[in-house]
Amino acid sequence: MEAARESMAALLDAGLFGPAQTLGCFLVSSAGAGNDAGMSMKVESLVQHGDALYGEKEFRRALNAYKQAMQYSRSIPRQATSNTRSAVSAIGRSPSPNSSNLLSFNENEVKFKIALCHSALCEHREALHEMEGIPSKVRTLKMNMMLGKLYRISRNSRTAAVCYKECLRQCPYVFEAITALAEMGLSAKEFSLLFPQAPNRGGKVPGDFVDAQRWWSRYVEAQCCIASHDYKGGLDIYLELMQRFPNNVHFLLEIAKVEAIIGRNDEAIMNFEKSKSDYIKLNKLVYDMLHIDPARPETCVALAAMWERKDERKALTYAEKSLRVDDRHITGYIMKGNLHLSLNRPDLAVTDFRGAQELRADLRSYQGLVRAYLALSKCKEALFTAREAMKVLHQSAKALKLVGDVHAISSSGREKARKFYESAIRLEPGFLGAALALADLHVVEGQNKEAVMLLEKYLRQWADDSLHIKLAQVHAATNMLSDALSHYQSALRINPQNEAAKTGLERLEKQMKGVDPDAPEEEEENEEDDIDDRDEFI
């Protein structure tokens, strides 16, 4: 079977895990165990079969294969295993489970593969146990990275930091380790000690090394700023680095993440319903993501967003799936929390938003927590959370509005709410959310004229459908039906898919015909007709 074993290695090298898995079945069943050489071949075949199964994402079967290899290896004398190892070491194959595998048995590498399988199955405690059995002196870069993640999942931040630091000592460009250490509170000065010393070439430091150290240090500073909630500082550094690395996709994604956290993108934050209703774009996004990688948590969240309006419970299953794929995916927690709010389960939403905050506190989790607490009539907890957001998110108009939203719940707090809304508008004049909230406050207090003036002032600068809808609602409440009709129509011209505008227009048309839009008679008749139709169908 020597030719078959060589073919097995070639298949694994080529990433053809399906054929390798099938061939592995033959090798495992044919390998004799009558002597030391046969036993070594048995172990080798089991490891290779495990690698093929891992490549096919059959993690449980791969785990069993690796464990069998460990058991068989213990019955082989050390001399036999060392001879096998030395005989194939010249081949120099990669020990990665997804590439060609070692023909010799390396116990530490197999332990690492067992840990990878446990981790893929979300059995993090078992994975950590296997990794801790690998001596620190022989841990590779991948092993240290894996161990850092596992310690962080188990909330052992101090030991996780040790592993991530070792990763950067081995290679300073492990950006995931930089982000993790920044989130765990490592300062920029402490980071600088991990960057390798400049090579000495005739007493001069090479220019490329100086340049690399400069932009590496700036990148570290950006991560430290964001980890300490200095989002403006982090964005400024990213924009500076974009001058050095134009059109850098990584920087563009990092900037987009921070923009989403602080809510600077008004179109994404204030018109979220509008973006969700544009199913053509959303469907295309989901379609593209499914073809790129259907197993990514981002794909599951996109599917949840797509199903949110049609079937919230099905959307919830996708949000939960995103967290099974990656239990540290913040957006998955946010989506799950918002869905629980929609399903009138604010108690579960609190747990979801707290889960997001444990990973990283940002505006979205604060907003969700405040909404959940208010739904539970826990006004004190809501106010405490909103104030905490105001302290953590320095100079954030969105955080100021959040405090105002809590005060606006009670009649005694409306004056305070007004001050917070006005402060938010002064801090960020283009913040439509604060303007709409202040207009609502005017309406509640019977100051419809002030509400109209405020909304029209914004409408002169921003042609936004949400402003038209709010104006239409105010005009309809004051029986100015023709003005309300005009604004609903304007909203639909801007966004034909806006459900709030469609519903408002239907109600308004009934009012203009002299029909009570809240009258139940017509709905009851329709329900009876539907029942009759179903009976006929049956």
Image (cartoon, helix red, strand yellow):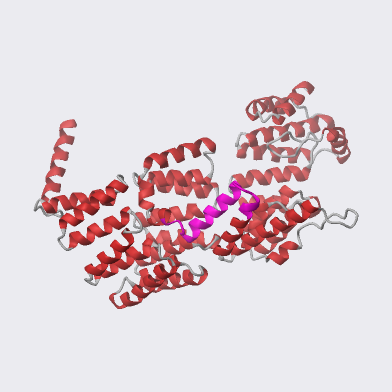
From the top left corner, tell me how far across and down residue 398 is, in percent: 43, 65
Q: Position of residue 365 (x, y in %)?
A: 46, 61
Residue 69 lies, with reference to residue 350, above or below; the image says: above
Q: Quadrant of residue 107?
A: top right
Q: Quadrant of the C terminus?
A: top left
**In this rendering, would 3 be left or right of 23?**
right
**Residue 536 in picture, x, y percent from top left:** 15, 32
Question: How many marks on residues?
Answer: 0
Residue most extreme to the left? 514
Q: Tell me what residue is drawn at x 59 percent, y 56 percent.
A: 239
Asked whether residue 346 is in view, the answer is yes
Give whichever of 64, 48 is nearer the camera. Answer: 48
Task: Check the picture and name the quadrant holding the N terminus.
Answer: top right
Q: Residue at x 79, y 23 (%)?
A: 2
Q: Residue at x 85, y 34 (%)?
A: 90
Check residue 148 for magenta coloring. no
Answer with left or right where residue 86 lies relative to residue 259.
right
In the rendered structure, the answer to whether residue 352 lies left or right of residue 452 reads: right
The magenta stretch spans which residues? 241-266
Residue at image location 27% in from the left, 66% down from the top: 453
Q: Main secondary structure of the magenta part?
A: helix
The answer to whether residue 156 shows anywhere in this view is no
Q: Where on the picture, by quarter, is residue 412?
A: bottom left
- Residue 115: x percent and y percent? 67, 47
